[in-house]
Image (tube, rainbow, N blue to C red):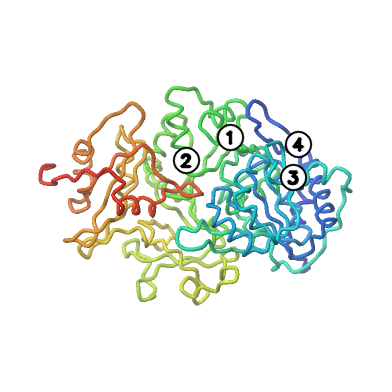
Amino acid sequence: MQERPLLISLLTDYGMKVYPNSEVITWEGDHARRASFETVGKRAHQLANALKGLGIKSGDRVATFCMNHQEHVEAYLAVPSMGAVLHTLNVRLFPEQLEYIIRDAEDQIIIFDALLAPALAKVKEHLGGVKHLVKVGQGDTSAFPDAIDYEDLIRDQSEKFEWPEFSEFEAASMCYTSGTTGNPKGVVYSHRSIYLHTLMVSAGAALGFTSSDKALIIVPMFHVNAWGTPYACWMSGSDMLMPKQYLQAAPIAAMFNTERPTRSAGVPTIWNDLLAYGEDNPIDMSNVKQIVAGGSAVPRKLIEAFKDRYNVRLLQGWGMTETSPLCALSFPPKGSDPAEEVSWLAKTGTLVPGVEIRITDDSGAVLEEDGIQVGEFEVRGPWITGSYFKNADPDRFHDGWLKTGDVGTLDAHGHMQISDRSKDVIKTGGEWISSVELENVLMAHPKVFEAAVVGVPDEKWDERPLACIVLKPGETASPQEIATWLAPKVAKWWLPERWSQISELPKTSVGKFDKKVIRAKYASGELDVTILDKAELK
């Protein structure tokens, strides 16, 4: 067999040649801006020529500080295709974290959205290693008077760049973890890993993009390559609908109503907000084949609501920054009872092709895959990272496996059910309580909008659950009322004594509940906590 390397440049030229009329559509608030794959591909060639003119060489890091839009897609194609490394900066990180990863990655150029200039300006004094700044779109960029305009940069460049050929194991892009503990850690994706991940994502056994699809890509391109969806859409000819900064329920509803996407992907909080908005506003999802939710556990109530109201399948996906990220999807198994579909969709998922998984106990011993024993999930495969950037971290990587930090059960057919993050499991009196399961039950309450459960210190039991509740707008319910409703639905010893009703749950930069902030607020006495006598709930 011929041994041509699997490079992003092959994807770049394939998409623009085979699907020249497919489109990248950028939502601009009151209209959509459109460009064909052929146009986007040519502009990617122009961008590569421009970056070369600015001194970018193979292996140099070119960062983006951008939302989801056409120009970001062009950078996704151009930067790795020319042999440089695309570094997507998370626009929601704290300045200290942003400063750290720009310095750690040794970024040479930052391409940034003009609208995000105020956020980037917070680390302006720490950009000494960055040689050039390139601004995209309109906004107040007075903090960066020397920034180069993106359109000016590429306008007179050739639409043909001779892509170099090199090892498929070379770095193509990099992303940093969201830094929930300590500094964020860098994960580098090779050309080979992205190419193979793209093939898997596009397959019918995964997300199944085709040229007849239009994908609304809500999951951010600044984190984990938007779950690989831009490359998968580009390879399959699926139109890409990019929401830019318009991530609220109303504009997302407008995108569904006017652009009629067939597929979409985003975190559960986005879909929960959209569902609430849809109670009083029309949303046309008649064209939608499937929605994928991931990043945190998807409540069964949310899956049922989309099925009942819109006849849309809400599929759950699981993965991490370290896994590119897709490792599992919650497809019901072949031959399963259709009446049990929602139960399967609410599970973590079944392995996708190319990934191996196992569970281990605290000593590292591999446990039996019987769907009963609980252990930590470990994974390996061609798009699973083997170490962090500049950090081998032997506590996370051993024997060729990545320790995920997720705990749960695994059966003989690759069906996995995560019960919690190892750091979030509530250890009470020698037993474990799953915060995720408690949250899912609580969010099924008709008056509850969101719920997060954390373990807090307890003199008698070491830890006990604290339930933080956000009610739906206009609703009222006391902790006693919700606890009484919850009592028959969980084990008696799972029932929280401590309850706090708050207006909004803190979230991480990627939309997950930020439990470390909740714990810190509890420890400092910032939360208004009601303590119930469980004897009264019988």
Give the crowd class for mark 2: few <14, some 14-19, many >=20 residues within 10 Å. Answer: many
Q: Residue at x 53, y 61 (%)?
A: 184
Residue 294: where, in percent of width, then height?
48, 48
Q: Secondary structure at mark 4?
A: strand
Instruction: Assess disc 3: are there few (<14), some (14-19) or many (≥20) residues with their C-alpha within 10 Å of its C-alpha.
Output: few
Residue at which label 3 appears = 145
Which quarter of the figure is the N terminus placed in? bottom right
C-alpha span from label 2 to label 1: 21 Å
- Residue on which the image places disc 2: 314
In percent of width and height, residue 88 lies at: 64, 54
Most foreground residue, 291 or 396:
396
Q: Are marks 3 and 4 in contact (CB under 8 Å)?
A: no
Q: Percent from the top left, x then y, of residue 471?
A: 33, 34
Label ID, residue 246: 1
Q: CA distance from mark 3 to mark 4?
A: 29 Å
First-in-chain label (1 vs 4): 4
Question: Label 4 vs label 2: CA separation?
Answer: 29 Å
SS at circle 1 = loop
Q: Amino acid at mark 4?
A: Ala
Front tag of 1 and 4: 1
